[in-house]
Image (cartoon, rainbow, N blue to C red):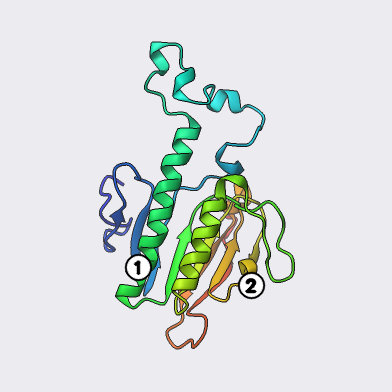
Protein backbone atom coordinates (compact mmCIF):
# COMPACT_ATOMS: atom_id res chain seq x y z
CA UNK A 1 0.00 0.00 0.00
CA UNK A 2 3.03 2.28 0.23
CA UNK A 3 3.30 2.50 -3.56
CA UNK A 4 0.46 4.77 -4.67
CA UNK A 5 1.46 4.58 -8.35
CA UNK A 6 0.11 1.06 -8.91
CA UNK A 7 -2.84 -1.07 -7.83
CA UNK A 8 -2.50 -3.84 -5.23
CA UNK A 9 -1.24 -6.27 -7.86
CA UNK A 10 1.57 -3.89 -8.76
CA UNK A 11 0.67 -4.25 -12.43
CA UNK A 12 -1.83 -1.50 -13.20
CA UNK A 13 -0.65 2.12 -13.11
CA UNK A 14 -2.70 4.39 -10.85
CA UNK A 15 -2.98 8.16 -11.10
CA UNK A 16 -3.81 10.21 -8.00
CA UNK A 17 -5.51 13.53 -8.60
CA UNK A 18 -3.33 15.65 -6.27
CA UNK A 19 -2.08 16.05 -2.71
CA UNK A 20 -5.23 18.00 -1.97
CA UNK A 21 -7.37 15.22 -3.45
CA UNK A 22 -5.56 12.04 -2.32
CA UNK A 23 -8.63 9.78 -2.36
CA UNK A 24 -9.43 10.43 -6.02
CA UNK A 25 -7.56 8.03 -8.26
CA UNK A 26 -7.80 6.70 -11.79
CA UNK A 27 -6.77 3.50 -13.54
CA UNK A 28 -7.72 1.48 -16.59
CA UNK A 29 -8.89 -2.08 -15.96
CA UNK A 30 -9.67 -4.24 -18.98
CA UNK A 31 -10.84 -1.30 -21.15
CA UNK A 32 -12.82 0.21 -18.27
CA UNK A 33 -11.68 3.50 -16.77
CA UNK A 34 -12.16 3.36 -13.00
CA UNK A 35 -12.14 6.69 -11.15
CA UNK A 36 -13.00 6.55 -7.41
CA UNK A 37 -14.04 9.83 -5.77
CA UNK A 38 -14.34 11.00 -2.14
CA UNK A 39 -18.07 11.00 -1.42
CA UNK A 40 -19.02 9.67 2.05
CA UNK A 41 -22.61 9.06 3.00
CA UNK A 42 -24.99 10.66 5.48
CA UNK A 43 -24.97 13.78 3.33
CA UNK A 44 -21.22 14.16 4.03
CA UNK A 45 -22.03 14.75 7.69
CA UNK A 46 -23.95 17.93 6.85
CA UNK A 47 -27.17 16.50 8.28
CA UNK A 48 -28.13 16.99 11.89
CA UNK A 49 -27.40 13.47 13.03
CA UNK A 50 -26.66 11.89 16.38
CA UNK A 51 -23.09 12.23 17.70
CA UNK A 52 -22.01 14.77 15.07
CA UNK A 53 -20.61 16.92 17.88
CA UNK A 54 -17.99 14.21 18.41
CA UNK A 55 -17.15 14.08 14.71
CA UNK A 56 -16.81 17.83 14.29
CA UNK A 57 -17.49 20.15 17.24
CA UNK A 58 -16.80 23.20 15.08
CA UNK A 59 -18.96 24.42 12.20
CA UNK A 60 -15.97 26.34 10.89
CA UNK A 61 -12.40 27.22 11.80
CA UNK A 62 -13.61 30.60 13.07
CA UNK A 63 -15.29 28.84 16.01
CA UNK A 64 -12.01 27.38 17.23
CA UNK A 65 -11.13 28.93 20.58
CA UNK A 66 -8.07 26.90 21.54
CA UNK A 67 -4.64 26.50 20.01
CA UNK A 68 -5.29 22.75 19.66
CA UNK A 69 -7.98 23.29 17.03
CA UNK A 70 -6.54 26.21 15.08
CA UNK A 71 -5.35 23.95 12.27
CA UNK A 72 -8.30 21.58 12.41
CA UNK A 73 -10.30 21.30 9.21
CA UNK A 74 -14.03 21.12 9.91
CA UNK A 75 -16.23 18.70 8.03
CA UNK A 76 -17.69 21.67 6.13
CA UNK A 77 -14.20 22.59 4.94
CA UNK A 78 -13.59 18.94 4.08
CA UNK A 79 -16.83 18.80 2.12
CA UNK A 80 -16.01 21.83 -0.01
CA UNK A 81 -12.48 20.56 -0.66
CA UNK A 82 -13.71 17.09 -1.65
CA UNK A 83 -16.59 18.44 -3.70
CA UNK A 84 -14.27 20.65 -5.75
CA UNK A 85 -11.95 17.69 -6.25
CA UNK A 86 -14.80 15.43 -7.33
CA UNK A 87 -16.29 17.80 -9.88
CA UNK A 88 -12.93 18.18 -11.60
CA UNK A 89 -12.18 14.44 -11.40
CA UNK A 90 -15.47 13.39 -13.00
CA UNK A 91 -14.73 15.72 -15.91
CA UNK A 92 -11.18 14.36 -16.14
CA UNK A 93 -12.42 10.77 -16.17
CA UNK A 94 -14.85 11.47 -19.00
CA UNK A 95 -12.17 13.33 -20.97
CA UNK A 96 -9.56 10.58 -20.53
CA UNK A 97 -12.01 7.86 -21.50
CA UNK A 98 -12.86 9.75 -24.69
CA UNK A 99 -9.19 10.31 -25.55
CA UNK A 100 -8.33 6.66 -24.91
CA UNK A 101 -11.34 5.42 -26.87
CA UNK A 102 -12.81 3.64 -23.84
CA UNK A 103 -16.53 2.98 -23.72
CA UNK A 104 -16.98 2.50 -19.97
CA UNK A 105 -16.31 4.74 -16.97
CA UNK A 106 -16.86 3.36 -13.45
CA UNK A 107 -17.03 5.87 -10.59
CA UNK A 108 -17.03 4.20 -7.14
CA UNK A 109 -17.71 6.05 -3.88
CA UNK A 110 -19.61 5.51 -0.63
CA UNK A 111 -22.67 7.76 -0.45
CA UNK A 112 -26.25 7.04 -1.26
CA UNK A 113 -26.57 10.42 -2.90
CA UNK A 114 -30.35 10.72 -3.31
CA UNK A 115 -33.12 11.20 -0.76
CA UNK A 116 -36.09 9.66 -2.60
CA UNK A 117 -36.22 6.11 -3.96
CA UNK A 118 -36.15 5.68 -7.75
CA UNK A 119 -39.59 5.98 -9.25
CA UNK A 120 -40.33 4.43 -12.62
CA UNK A 121 -37.60 5.74 -14.91
CA UNK A 122 -35.36 6.57 -12.00
CA UNK A 123 -36.29 10.18 -11.18
CA UNK A 124 -34.31 11.17 -8.09
CA UNK A 125 -33.92 14.05 -5.67
CA UNK A 126 -30.27 14.45 -4.69
CA UNK A 127 -29.25 15.03 -1.10
CA UNK A 128 -28.23 18.60 -0.40
CA UNK A 129 -24.52 17.84 -0.44
CA UNK A 130 -24.68 16.05 -3.77
CA UNK A 131 -26.59 18.39 -6.03
CA UNK A 132 -23.32 19.31 -7.75
CA UNK A 133 -22.51 15.64 -8.33
CA UNK A 134 -25.94 15.04 -9.84
CA UNK A 135 -25.62 18.04 -12.16
CA UNK A 136 -22.08 17.07 -13.16
CA UNK A 137 -23.11 13.52 -14.02
CA UNK A 138 -25.98 14.76 -16.17
CA UNK A 139 -23.56 17.09 -17.95
CA UNK A 140 -20.81 14.55 -18.70
CA UNK A 141 -23.25 11.82 -19.77
CA UNK A 142 -24.90 14.22 -22.19
CA UNK A 143 -21.57 15.38 -23.61
CA UNK A 144 -20.27 11.79 -23.94
CA UNK A 145 -23.26 9.86 -25.22
CA UNK A 146 -21.06 7.09 -26.66
CA UNK A 147 -19.60 6.26 -23.22
CA UNK A 148 -21.45 4.28 -20.53
CA UNK A 149 -21.06 5.65 -17.01
CA UNK A 150 -21.57 3.48 -13.92
CA UNK A 151 -21.72 4.98 -10.43
CA UNK A 152 -21.20 2.32 -7.75
CA UNK A 153 -21.67 2.75 -4.01
CA UNK A 154 -22.63 0.92 -0.81
CA UNK A 155 -24.10 3.40 1.65
CA UNK A 156 -27.40 1.54 1.99
CA UNK A 157 -27.67 -2.16 2.68
CA UNK A 158 -29.32 -3.75 -0.33
CA UNK A 159 -28.87 -4.16 -4.08
CA UNK A 160 -30.61 -1.86 -6.54
CA UNK A 161 -29.82 -0.77 -10.10
CA UNK A 162 -31.43 2.05 -12.04
CA UNK A 163 -30.69 4.79 -14.57
CA UNK A 164 -31.16 8.22 -12.96
CA UNK A 165 -33.74 10.25 -14.87
CA UNK A 166 -33.77 7.40 -17.41
CA UNK A 167 -30.44 8.62 -18.82
CA UNK A 168 -29.47 5.89 -21.27
CA UNK A 169 -25.71 6.01 -20.65
CA UNK A 170 -25.78 6.30 -16.85
CA UNK A 171 -26.36 3.24 -14.65
CA UNK A 172 -26.38 3.64 -10.87
CA UNK A 173 -25.50 0.48 -8.93
CA UNK A 174 -26.08 0.28 -5.19
CA UNK A 175 -24.35 -2.74 -3.65
CA UNK A 176 -24.38 -4.22 -0.15
CA UNK A 177 -22.85 -2.17 2.63
CA UNK A 178 -22.13 -2.68 6.32
CA UNK A 179 -21.44 -6.23 7.54
CA UNK A 180 -23.50 -7.79 4.76
CA UNK A 181 -21.03 -6.26 2.34
CA UNK A 182 -18.54 -8.83 3.64
CA UNK A 183 -20.54 -11.67 2.11
CA UNK A 184 -20.86 -10.48 -1.48
CA UNK A 185 -19.34 -8.07 -3.97
CA UNK A 186 -20.20 -6.59 -7.34
CA UNK A 187 -18.25 -7.98 -10.27
CA UNK A 188 -17.92 -5.82 -13.38
CA UNK A 189 -16.86 -7.45 -16.63
CA UNK A 190 -16.07 -5.76 -19.92
CA UNK A 191 -18.08 -7.27 -22.77
CA UNK A 192 -15.94 -6.98 -25.88
CA UNK A 193 -18.67 -7.64 -28.43
CA UNK A 194 -21.58 -5.84 -26.77
CA UNK A 195 -23.25 -3.33 -29.09
CA UNK A 196 -25.10 -1.42 -26.35
CA UNK A 197 -23.94 -1.88 -22.77
CA UNK A 198 -20.18 -2.64 -22.75
CA UNK A 199 -20.14 -3.81 -19.14
CA UNK A 200 -22.03 -6.56 -17.34
CA UNK A 201 -22.20 -6.74 -13.56
CA UNK A 202 -23.48 -9.24 -11.07
CA UNK A 203 -23.53 -9.93 -7.36
CA UNK A 204 -20.99 -12.58 -6.40
CA UNK A 205 -21.63 -14.44 -3.14
CA UNK A 206 -18.57 -15.28 -1.13
CA UNK A 207 -18.12 -18.45 0.86
CA UNK A 208 -18.97 -18.13 4.52
CA UNK A 209 -16.30 -20.63 5.48
Mark 2, residue position: 166
Q: Do the residues labelled 2 and 1 touch (CB within 8 Å)?
A: no
- Dot 2 or dot 1: first in sequence order is 1
Question: Around disc 1, counting alpha carbons within 10 Å, would you say few (fewer than 14), some (14 to 19), or many (20 or more)?
Answer: some
Mark 1, residue position: 95
Front position in the image: 150 or 168: 168
Image quarter of the C terminus: bottom right
Front position in the image: 59 or 8: 59
Front position in the image: 51 or 167: 167
The disc label shown at residue 158, or none: none
Hey, which quadrant is residue 82 in on the image?
top left
Helix, strand or loop at label 1? It is helix
Front position in the image: 13 or 18: 18
At x 29% / y 58%, what residue is drawn? 14
Farthest top residue? 66
Helix, strand or loop at label 2? It is helix
Coordinates of residue 15 in the picture (x, y in percent): 29, 56
Coordinates of residue 61 in the picture (x, y in percent): 44, 23
Question: Around disc 2, counting alpha carbons within 10 Å, would you say few (fewer than 14), some (14 to 19), or many (20 or more)?
Answer: few
Q: Is residue 8 above or below residue 55?
A: below
Amino acid sequence: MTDTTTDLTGKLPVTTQSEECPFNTMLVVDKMLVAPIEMPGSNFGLSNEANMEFVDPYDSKEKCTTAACEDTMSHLDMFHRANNCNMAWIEEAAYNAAVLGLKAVIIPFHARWWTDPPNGGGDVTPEAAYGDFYSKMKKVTKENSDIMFYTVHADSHYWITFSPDAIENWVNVLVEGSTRGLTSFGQFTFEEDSESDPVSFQEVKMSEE
